[in-house]
Amino acid sequence: MALYAIGDLHLSLGTNKPMDVFGGGWVDYTDKLTAGFSSLNADDVCVLCGDISWGMSLDESLEDFKFIDRLPGKKIILKGNHDYWWATAAKMESFFSSNGITSIEILHNNCYYCSGVAICGTRGWLGDEQLTAEQNAKIYSRETTRLRASLQAAKNADVKICFFHYPVRFKNIVCHEFITAMDEFGVKSCYYGHLHGEGHRLAVRGLVDGINYEIVSADFVDFVPRKVSY
């Protein structure tokens, strides 16, 4: 059993918003994802770090979930900023069950284990210029609470790895509350997505103040899930 991560699949099998229109590496990206996942085994686990489907509802996203379900391994999903279909965990679990989707689990205020390693995380937040400072602070606080709930669920694990959609460090932004929580719970590795194209060169990678950071946006990892080291 091995642990992998990839973010930003941006699937659009049930809607008309394919990423192929951006050209470059996004051309035939669903075929590339199928090929990229082909090396995973049935007992492997892959964390999908948000921006999973362009569907505006669970029903619109169904074909995307079926595509993911057919890929080998167990998939653990967390919310991205474009996952407008996201609902309560109970509603999503019921939807998956009623549609025969069996390989997708939801990371939200909880944790999962892979070979004794705790998989923790939340969407994260970088702020939105269209929101007030008070609104941004409220979202940031909520995401911090969700991260701490996830880490608390894994408090007895010797190794905890955090997964976010947004980067925790980006340009002049440092999400101190997220980093403080990771430090308190002994997290040494952090994986995230969200950044594309020119944003790749701004990604923080490697060891910073005791935590190793890695970007796993699909177009950064060439649509091949990145094996997580621990």
Image: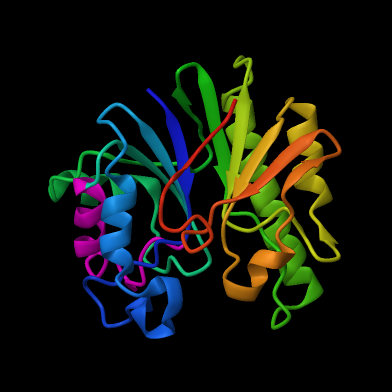
Image check: 30 left or right of 188?
left
Q: Can residue 91 be seen in this view?
A: no
Quarter occupied by residue 159: top right
Image check: 214 left or right of 106?
right
Image coordinates of residue 55 in percent, x first then y, are 32, 71
Residue 66 in magenta stretch: yes
Q: Is residue 138 visible?
A: yes
- Residue located 22% across and 51% down the image: 95
Image coordinates of residue 133 in percent, x first then y, are 80, 73
Residue span colored magenta:
51-70
Image check: 47 left or right of 161?
left
Look at the image and tell me in which quarter the C terminus lies: top right
The residue nearer to you, when weighing 145 against 118, is: 118
Image coordinates of residue 23 in percent, x first then y, are 41, 81
The residue nearer to you, when weighing 137 against 164, is: 164
Residue 50 in magenta stretch: no
User: From the viewer's perspective, is residue 86 above or below residue 3?
Assistant: below
